[in-house]
Amino acid sequence: MSDVLQTRGLKRNFEQGGVTIHVLRGVDLTVGNGEIVALLGPSGSGKSTLLQAVGLLEGGFEGSIRIKGEEAAHLDNDGRTRLRRDALGFVYQFHHLLPDFNAVENVILPQLIHGSETSAARDRAESLLTALGLGARLTHRPSKLSGGEQQRVAVARALANRPSLVLADEPTGNLDEATADVVFQEFLKLVRHEGSAALVATHNERIAAKMDRVVRLHDGVLE
Ligand code: ADP
Ligand code: MG
């Protein structure tokens, strides 16, 4: 079976005040099925830019991005949306939960958009949230949850549609150190249990060391 992710010669420039900034200068990255990879690099090194490109959130890149063997570079908007929904899950530094929906509803919603039946989506949401220790918080709205709990809901939401690849951008960057360690440990355990692969941007060496492999972004390429 092909790797879940393969980028070749991935480039991304930004124009700023008439100057071209070469953020990604030819990134070659492979993530195997079920593999959990840490993407390390200092602030401004292009980690988020790389995740946005791989997440098919915007065009504007050069080079090849294969997701589950499918070349994404030439897809139109609809094709990118389909591949993103079928294959990818996202966790960000800030949870981006819907404030008017409770925890379980936030995890049900993406499944309904994906075409799941309501009862199956509810079962799946409750089981993911319970696995993350939120069994007693299912009907709490985000504003009634702690930062660590909010991030756990975001993790459950990212995994809801059984993505082959989870893209996480500083997923614990907004939490204090102790909470970050616990939430990240739970994230890893659940992602492994689900069998998903993950690409996790972080500048935290300690968290990075817990993953299967570490890659470093430096001067627009992987070292
Ligand atoms: P990191 O996530 O590693 O901190 P980023 O990917 O956010 O790095 O940013 C890498 C570089 O790209 C930075 O110099 C940043 O200013 C620049 N950059 C990112 N997004 C844009 C944008 N939309 N327009 C212009 N420059 C950008
Ligand atoms: Mg970033």
Image: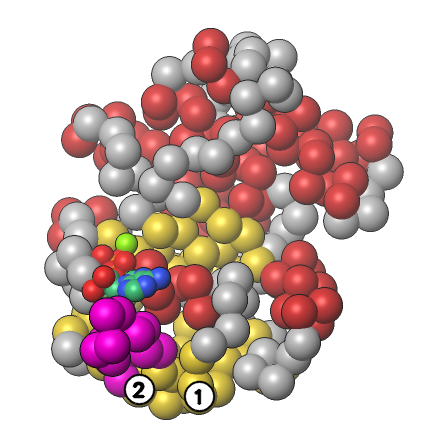
Is residue 128 in view? yes
Q: Which range of residues does the magenta coloring cover?
A: 12-25
**What is the three-letter code of the residue carrying label 2?**
Gly
For label 2, the crowd category at 10 Å Cα-Cα, with few meaning under 14, some 14 to 19 and many 20 or more, is some
Query: Which residue is located at x 65 percent, y 79 percent?
Result: 75
For the stretch drawn in magenta, the main secondary structure is strand
Q: Quadrant of ligand 1?
A: bottom left
Q: Which residue is mark 1?
A: 63
Q: Would you say 185 lies left or right of 88 here?
A: left
When the figure is inspected, residue 208 is found, relative to residue 138, above or below; the finding is below
Task: Give how far across and how far down residue 50 sits, in percent.
Answer: 36, 68
**What is the three-letter code of the residue carrying label 1?**
Gly
User: Hey, which quadrant is residue 91 in on the image?
Assistant: top left
Ranked by sequence position, the earlier of labels 2 and 1 is 2
Callout 2–callout 1 Cβ contact below 8 Å: yes
User: Hey, which quadrant is residue 94 in on the image?
Assistant: top left
- Image quarter hosting the N terminus: bottom right
Q: Would you say 84 lies left or right of 22 here?
A: right
